[in-house]
Structure formats: structure tokens, C-alpha cells
Amino acid sequence: MKFARLLLASLAMTTWAASPISAQQAPLQVAFTFDDLPAHGPLPPGEYRPEPIRSIIKTLKTEQMPPVYGFVNGFRTAEYPYQTKLLREWIASGNPLGNHTWSHPSLDKSSAKKYIHNIAENEPLLEKVDPAGDWHWFRFPYLEEGDTMAKRNAVRDYLSDNHYKIAEVNLDFGDYLWNDAYARCAAKKDDAAVASLHDSYLATADEYITYSRTLSQRLYGRDIPYVLLLHVGAFDAKMLPELIGLFRKRGFEFVSLPQAESDPAYSVDPKVAYPGGGLLMELVATTRNVTLPNATQPEDELAKMCR
Ligand SMILES: [Zn+2]
């Protein structure tokens, strides 16, 4: 009897110690990443193309962020050759570049062959601007990793044969949606609307921090290091200091993409065709029949603003 009681007590202690909400847990970690360099989304009147990127570079420095990956679509530099300079400024500031395809195709709407050609088409530019850099990180446009297993496998084979690592995403609040609305509201000089965009951007980011943390707990029983998807848009640039502040307030420390993805959660390939794209955790959840948490969808509301 005595033994049984002791055993129960020790089991209870083990359970408590392994609890994901234990106060002993290591700090939360997140890697910020930016897509669509050198240009993303419309600009408000009076703002010029180099400004969002230069502002982001400045904020990353002021906030003493670790190196932040920027994912490049080279076709912009073919249209506007001066934008190559913005890529060089990104590297010169200590932030690395990665491959985001040449012209941002949707893998769902493309053949694997055309898509792979589009990845390769981006490589001479990356090699030219960053010959010494670790630019063999690939970010799938729209997070579409393949709507069929055949496409998924073909692209992954190309990536692994060419020594790429996949820059997965595990935190995404649809930041890009605010850039269009901001450009419209700023053009109408609607200060109240811009103020509401400011508030909803941070509130939605906060909600999706909870979304990803909840999903991570359901899948892994812990917080994995998160990788956040952002874009080099005008509103993203404007909001970046406060977004970094929000993550600090929620207990996060900042790590680089390679550091975050050194976690074993990132070495698991869920091997699932997933039309429409999603977070790595969302793909894993479908293979394990884990329910996704609820979250608001800001898209319709933002699309209506300042029309
Ligand atoms: Zn993109």
C-alpha cells in the first residue's frame, strides 16, 4: 500500500514536471523573415520604393535583431535594375537573402517543371549579389508546397539535389493584407482608418501568436521555435518597431531562421499534398487528425476599407 501511494505521488510529480505550462520552460523563440524583396505591395502617396526596405533594415539594427532572412523575387530587378542595390543594402546590413522564385508563381497553378525552372532562374542574381552568402534557403510563394504528391516530391527533389533548406513558416497573421488598405486609406488622408489599421495589425498578430502556440502545444506538447512570415510592404515597415515590441511583451527572444529550424520539429516532412498552402504545423496537423484552433480572418474587413 505504501509503495502504491509513493508510486502515485511520483507519477503525479512526473506529470507536473512535464506539463507544457511549467514555469521552468525556456524562453519563447521566434525568427522574423521577410518575403518579396525588393518590392512588395502598393505604396502610400509620397513614399518611394526604397523606403520600406531601408526603414526595415534600420529597425532591425536599432532593435538589435539577429540576422533576418529576406526572400527575393528577381523579376523586380529586371523591371527596375536600381532595385538590385536594395538587395545589396540588405546584405551589407548583415541580413541574409534566400530564394523565393524568380517571379512568384503559384505551385498549385504551375507544373513542377515550370516551377523548378522559375526557382533556378533566380539563382544567377543571388549568386551575383551574394556570392559568399548562405542563400540556399527556399521560401515557397503562398506557402504552397504542392497540391499533389507528384509536384511536392519533384520540387523537393530539386531543392535537396541543389542543397537547399526549406524556409518553413509556423506563424502567419496575413500581414500583407494591411499594405493595400494602408495605401488606400493614406491616399484618402483618412487618419481614423489608418489608426484602426494600426490597432488591428497588432491585435491580429497577437491573436495568431496564440493560434500558433496553441497548435504547437496540441502537436508537440511544447512551444517550438516559431518562424514568422512578413513582407517588405510599407505598412509592415511602419509597424515593425511595435510588432517587435509586442513579441518582447509576450516573452519572446529573437533567433535566426537557421537557429529556429535546428529544432527537430522542422526536420519532419509531413508528406501531404495541401492545396492552398499553409503552415508546416497545419500540414502536420492534417496527417495526425489534430484540430486547428479558431482564429479570425481579417481579409474581408480589410478589403472593404477606404474604398
Ligand atoms: Zn511572396
Image: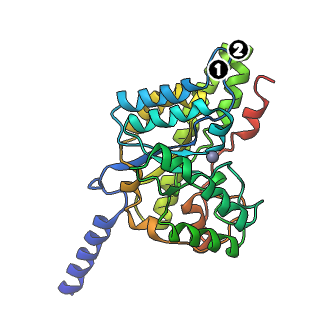
Q: Quadrant of the N terminus?
A: bottom left
Q: Quadrant of the C terminus?
A: top right
Residue bearing mark 2: 190
Along the line of sight, the residue nearer the viewer: 53 or 204: 53
Identify the residue at horizontal 76%, vertical 27% (top origin).
305
**Residue at disc 2, CB closer than 8 Å to ligand 1:** no
* Residue 239 left/right relative to 21: right
Pick whichever, 292 or 272, lies toward us: 272
Quarter of the image for residue 244 reads top left
**Residue at position x 30%, y 55% in the image:** 25
The x and y percentages for residue 135 are 46, 52
CB under 8 Å between discs 1 and 2: yes
Q: Position of residue 202 (x, y in %)?
A: 54, 33
- Which amino acid does the dot numbered 2 rest on? Asp
Residue drawn at 23 percent across, 75 percent down: 10
Residue type (three-letter) at the residue carrying disc 1: Val
Name the secondary structure under disc 2.
loop
**Relative vertical location of residue 151 with respect to residue 197 in this rendering, above or below:** below
SS class of the residue under badge 1? helix
Q: Nearer the viewer, residue 295 or 31?
A: 31
Residue of label 1: 194
Residue 248: x and y, percent? 38, 37
Is 175 on the left or on the right of 300, as rendered?
Answer: left
Q: Residue furthest left?
A: 2
